[in-house]
Amino acid sequence: METISIEGTPKTPTITFDTGKGFLEIKGRSIPENSIEFYKPLVDWLEKYAAKPQSTTNVNIQLEYFNTSSSKCILDVFKKLEAINKGGSQVTINWYYEEDDEDMLEAGEDYQAIINVPFKMVQVEE
Amino acid sequence: MMLDIYDFYDKMERNNIMLSFKGDITSELLTSILQIMESKLDNLQEEPKIKKKVYNVLVECLQNLYHHMDEVAPEQNDKIRSAIFMIGKLDNQYNIITGNYIKNENVAGLKKRLEDINLLSKEELKEYYKAVLNNGEMSLKGGGGLGMIDIARKTGEKLNFNFSPVDNTFSFFTLNIKISQ
């Protein structure tokens, strides 16, 4: 088991995936022009993890901004998590949003409506 | 060339243009524009809510231009690859204006798509967004036809657009997005 991470940039988020603890965090901004390229490694890691997941998998999504190009890739990540949840690991997705950011809350609710994994909407102060 | 610079300046001043650009749209340029606009929004001490909305819509508008360049004119000359972008703030309303060439054969399709989006209510836009998000289709770079829906949804305004015929091959497409406080 290992920890995999991608350092954030002004256009891409910091990603930390501790497979030993079953903890994944995506934090920062996700506004790259080419999001498929950016999210490919994460989707691949999740595929590997799915073969031997921990009994629980906690996922923190704490994004300040994300573009529509990222939104389909984030859905792909969630679909992998949905499969992991079905496969025996209890997955929780914690969706963080700042208290007055209704757009970010709604975005989380959109995913919640599509993905069959428990979501927790977590309000944070600015 | 005789360009009346004062006239140019005066028009920009009266429309309170904060930033404008004309030319080839590159990834590096977008990074710079976004950095400049972010610090301008900070300096104006906008509410975080407005700041985020403007920034989000700006990202979508600029990335539309960027992706459009590659799709429509990968081998065209600089003139056709060139686009225009402006952002201004007048009477507590942000205006984002973009303009780019589009092939005449693509005008009808885009026009229909924008008109269809403009017919939708807030709730219908939400449902449409979710349907397109989950339709499994993605372009090579990850754009998925969500940009315009997202802009309409976040601004709560109709998309204001225009197509001006240029010649037998191209038209000029302009989009004027308003973000009210």
Image: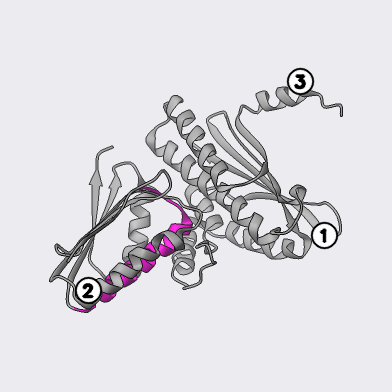
Q: Distance between the residues labelled 2 and 1?
A: 52 Å
Q: How far apart are marks 3 and 2 (CA)?
A: 64 Å
Pinpoint the chain carrying mark 2. A
Q: Which of A83 and B140 is in front in this view?
A: B140
The label shown at residue A85 is: 2
- Residue A32 appears in the figure: yes
Q: Does the magenta stretch include residue B113?
A: no
User: Callout 2: 10 Å neighbours few (<14), some, many (20+)?
Assistant: many
From the image, tell me which residue sits under label 3: B6
Tell if the residue under mark 3 belongs to the same chain as the one under mark 1. Answer: yes
Q: What stretch is highlighted in magenta?
A: A63-87
Res B1 quadrant in image:
top right
* Label 1 neighbour load within 10 Å: few <14, some 14-19, many 20+: few
Instruction: Identify the subunit bearing mark 1.
Output: B
The quarter in which the N terminus of chain A is drawn is bottom left
Q: Is residue B155 visible?
A: no
Q: What residue type is labelled 2?
A: Asn
State which tag comes first along the sequence, 3 or 1: 3
Task: Tell me the residue that label 1 is attached to.
Answer: B169
Residue A15: % across, % down? 30, 54
In three-dimensional space, the C-alpha distance between marks 3 and 1, rounded to whole angstroms, equals: 34 Å
Residue A68 within the segment the image draws in magenta: yes
Magenta: predominant secondary structure element? helix
